[in-house]
Image (cartoon, rainbow, N blue to C red):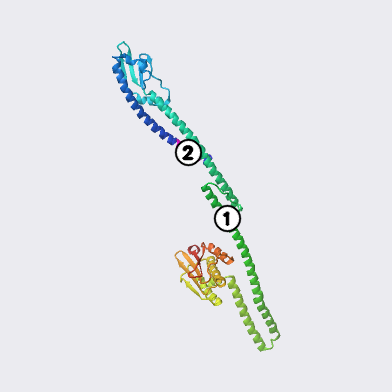
Amino acid sequence: MAAPLSALGRASLLVSALFLAVLLVCLALVLRQAELDIRRELQAADSVARFLALRAADDPALLDASLTANLRHLELDWGDDARGGAVDNPLAHWLAGRFADLPVYRVALSDGRSLSIRVSPLDELDEVWESLLQLLALFLVAWLLCLGASAWLVGRGLGLLTEVLRALQAIAGGALDTRLPEYAQPEARRLAGQVNAMAQALQQAGADNQALTAALLDTQERERTRLAQALHDDVGQILAGMRAQLYLLGHCHDQPQQVAAISRRLQDTSEQMQQSFRRLVRDLYPVMLEHLGLGEAVRQHVEQWQAQQGLPCALELDDALPRLRDEARAHVFRLLQEALTNVARHAGAQRAEVRLTCRGADLRLEVCDDGHGLPTPLREGVGLRSMRERARCLGAALQLHDAAPRGLRLCVEIPWREWTA
């Protein structure tokens, strides 16, 4: 299988084909015009030939060599003495047949000699041939110049593409600090600018991912510490109290009233430990999603948030929400949970609004407040970054806008059909 042509080869082939096409068209036009011009010249020469044929019989002096030596387009044949020129170029061979019908005038002179006067196109054919040679030479020079110019341009373009390819390969290999230089050509400068912007964006994304990873690890450690403290301070103390009460119960089994009191305290302590475990489980995973569904889980969480924070929160909830897969439901719920947490911690708001509605192919979650609004400049913490990542996992984008007249509006539009159960 033949190797494909290079870019320079294809450009040279295209330039050569265009030049050949133009050359053929020019040759056709020149030859057509040359034929018309030759016929006009031969018509004029025919008039001269008729004049000479008519007057030569009466006045042979008109045919003196000094008068006829420089006649163009006429051949005077004195018997075996032919003055006509020979056909000496390819164009004459090709066109000679198109002028085969030219007249020949035979004259019997008074001195007994015979003369043939014929109209000849050979002089014109020689001129046309010289013009064609000049045209071919001009086309050859122009063709070579265009090939050289195209080779230079293609070489420069391929050089730029080679540099861009090397830069992209370096970026793909992890060298995100790779940058292309500033080029003089506007097109090359724009291309290099786009590659550099892409590398800058990837480098920034890598730095953000590293920062997010570090922040998530830190959050994980803090969550583990909080869970350990909760287990130690809450559940551990409850279990220590239960153990002490069981110890007392073993030493007063013969005192019914004391046994009954200890039993009641054990029941209360067991209930307290159960509530503590429920809080821990609710913080670790929203179990209500499995039992209540997304809509009721959102409603219950909003009610609990109002009770805990002491802030009013209006809820707009569609009656018929799509049934999402567990992963998508967890993401939506965590988005709402984190958004309300941010309202309580950072917004300084007096009220909040939550909307979970389905409009066509999008499930829209909105959380609004009347607090401080977007800070300037915006510095994203772990919570906001995790929300953006959850939105990205759902095929959506987290949008933050200033609310009117004040506050912040958070919006996520989720293509729910991709996440139906």
Vertical side of 420 occupied by 106: above or below: above
- Residue tagged 1: 200
Residue depicted at x 49% and y 62%: 418
From the top left corner, tell me how far across and down residue 101 is, in percent: 33, 23
Q: Pick whichever, 166 or 394, lies toward us.
A: 166
Residue segment shown in magenta = 9-19
Q: Which residue sits at x=65%, y=73%?
A: 229
From this view, report whether residue 205 is shown above or below residue 39.
below
Q: Quadrant of residue 255?
A: bottom right
Quadrant in which residue 107 is drawn: top left
What residue would you read off at disc 2? Answer: 15
Tag 1, which secondary structure? helix
* Residue 134 seen by the camera: yes
* Marked residue nearer the N-terminal end (1 or 2): 2
Query: Tag 1: residue type?
Result: Gln
The residue located at (65%, 86%) in the rendering is 261
Q: Which sits in the foreground, 2 or 342? A: 342
Q: Secondary structure at mark 2?
A: helix
Amino acid, disc 2: Val
At 47% across and 35% down in the image, what residue appears?
142
Alpha-carbon neighbours of circle 1 within 10 Å: few (<14), some, or many (≥20)? Answer: some
